[in-house]
């Protein structure tokens, strides 16, 4: 079976802590795989808030939508653990960019997951892609 291998960047732009809630736990008594994507979403929203943006406006009224996602699971998380989520923003195209996430379980100091989401700039009214705003790019370049 071919396994996903994400080439992670050497540095990160943003870091936040997110606790594992009881509703994040699955029947195996550990962090559910789908909840990792939810934790990534929460971290992404926090990053955007930090720079004065939102998923509905990253500049010039341009919204974003997720084009793809990949997660490389490395270790478990449990109820009550705090997860440090570090995010890097890179690989800008004309209408898209990549977000890289490093999730570390602070209770064990083990990497919980590496992940990547392909983010596409989007106009929800016209249902068409948009150009990445230069003002957004400049924050990360």
Image: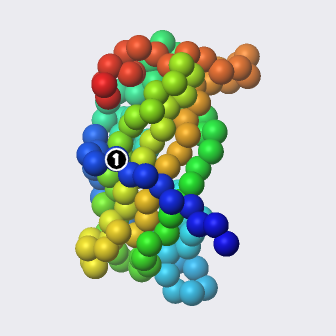
Q: x%, y% of residue 36?
A: 51, 63
Quadrant in the picture for the C terminus: top left
Which residue is at the front of the view, 3 or 101?
3
Q: Residues within 10 Å of mark 1 (few under 14, many from 20)?
A: few
Which residue is at the front of the view, 23 or 72?
72
Residue in the picture at 49% in, 75% down: 31
Residue 134 sits in quarter: top left
- Seen in the picture, residue 40 relative to 123 is either above or below; the reply is below
In the rendered structure, the answer to whether residue 103 lies left or right of residue 27 reads left
Which residue is at the front of the view, 78 or 94?
94
In the rendered structure, the answer to whether residue 101 lies left or right of residue 126 reads left
Q: What residue is disc 1 on?
A: 9
Q: x%, y% of residue 79?
A: 41, 79
Residue 34 sits in quarter: bottom right
Q: Is residue 40 visible?
A: no
Residue in the picture at 48% in, 12% down: 60
Residue in the picture at 40% in, 69% down: 112
Q: Is residue 26 visible?
A: yes
Residue in the picture at 51% in, 60% down: 5
Q: x%, y% of residue 82?
A: 32, 69
Dot 1 lies on which element?
loop
In the rendered structure, the answer to whether residue 122 lies left or right of residue 132 reads right
């Amino acid at each position: 079976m071919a396994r996903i291998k994400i080439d992670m960047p050497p540095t990160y732009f943003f870091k936040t802590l997110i606790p594992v809630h009881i509703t994040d736990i699955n029947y195996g008594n550990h962090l559910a795989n789908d909840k990792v994507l939810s934790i990534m979403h929460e971290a992404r929203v926090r990053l955007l808030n930090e720079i004065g943006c939102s998923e509905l406006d990253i500049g010039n009224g341009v919204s974003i939508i997720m084009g793809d996602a990949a997660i490389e699971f490395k270790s478990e998380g449990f109820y009550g653990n705090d997860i440090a989520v570090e995010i890097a923003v890179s690989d800008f195209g004309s209408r898209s960019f990549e977000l890289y996430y490093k999730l570390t379980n602070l209770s064990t100091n083990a990497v919980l997951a590496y992940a990547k989401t392909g983010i596409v700039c989007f106009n929800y009214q016209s249902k068409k892609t948009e150009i990445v705003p230069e003002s957004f790019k400049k924050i990360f370049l």
